[in-house]
Image (cartoon, rainbow, N blue to C red):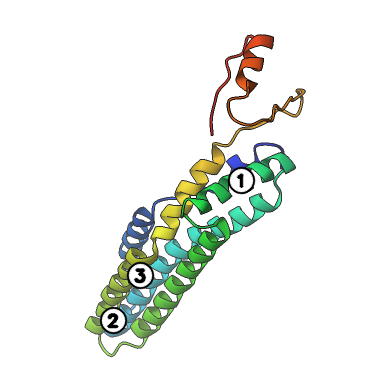
Amino acid sequence: LELGGLRQLPRVFPAEEVVNRAINSGLRVEEDTSVRNSRQRGRKWAAEQINELSKQLTKPTGEILDGYNKVMRRLKPFEKVVADLTIKARELSGYGSLSETLEMVKELRKNSLAVCRAAAQAGKNADTRKQAEREVEICIASIEELWERDGWCLDLLLDMGRELRSVPMLNEELDTVVLVGSPNVGKSSIVRCISTGTPEVNN
């Protein structure tokens, strides 16, 4: 990656949006009317709805995990230092480390997959069509409970990604001068004296 690698971090959506989109996608799965037996048709429909729900939860979270690991491994030295400082500052503020946050997202994905797999199997083995439909309802309720409890880690990663993508970037084609010093020793004054630029002062 060239400089600007942090801006290639995968996009993260709010947890509530992800789970609602997944549930709606699962419920939109159409029943296979070619299966004549009502119970078998209900079983198949329940399993397909749950599998679609599972896919819409695990695919985006998997892409997020893979994307973060790939980008963070391939950062240029300057961006790696700035990213580490940004993450450390957030950690000191009580938000936790990036590795911890990614591990929580991984666990959320794993638990979502486990809930859906168990529900899909229960739907396939349902004694009646009504029971199969009930398994879909139970699965959705379980997923909603899980994401309401643990989905905050995705929202935490969303905020962290926004901050990481906003870190300063360097142009490798231009010479770069770095002024280092304690606060209020005149760094900004030097810039004002020797250039027409207006210093941007930040912590």
Q: Residues within 10 Å of mark 3 (few under 14, many from 20)?
A: some
Q: Earlier in the sequence, mark 1 or mark 3?
A: 1
Q: Earlier in the sequence, mark 2 or mark 3?
A: 2
Q: Mark 1 or 3, which is nearer the eye?
A: 1
Q: Residues within 10 Å of mark 1 (few under 14, many from 20)?
A: few
Residue at position x 69%, y 30% in the image = 180
Q: Quickly name the residue at label 2.
A: 132
Q: CA distance from mark 2 to mark 3?
A: 21 Å
Q: Quickly name the residue at label 3.
A: 146
Residue at position x 42%, y 50% in the image = 13
At label 1, the amino acid type is Leu
Q: Judge by depth and name the residue closer to the eye, 132 or 83.
A: 83
Q: Quickly name the residue at label 1.
A: 85
Residue at position x 62%, y 16% in the image = 189
For the residues bearing labels 1 and 3, Cβ distance under 8 angstroms: no
Up-down relation of residue 19 to residue 184 (above or below): below
- Which quadrant is the N terminus positioned in? top right
Side of 19 where 156 appears, left or right: right
Residue 195: tell me if it is visible: no
Task: Identify the secondary structure beneath mark 2.
Answer: helix
At label 3, the amino acid type is Leu
- Where residue 154 appears, as percent x and y from the top left, is 44, 57
At label 2, the amino acid type is Ala
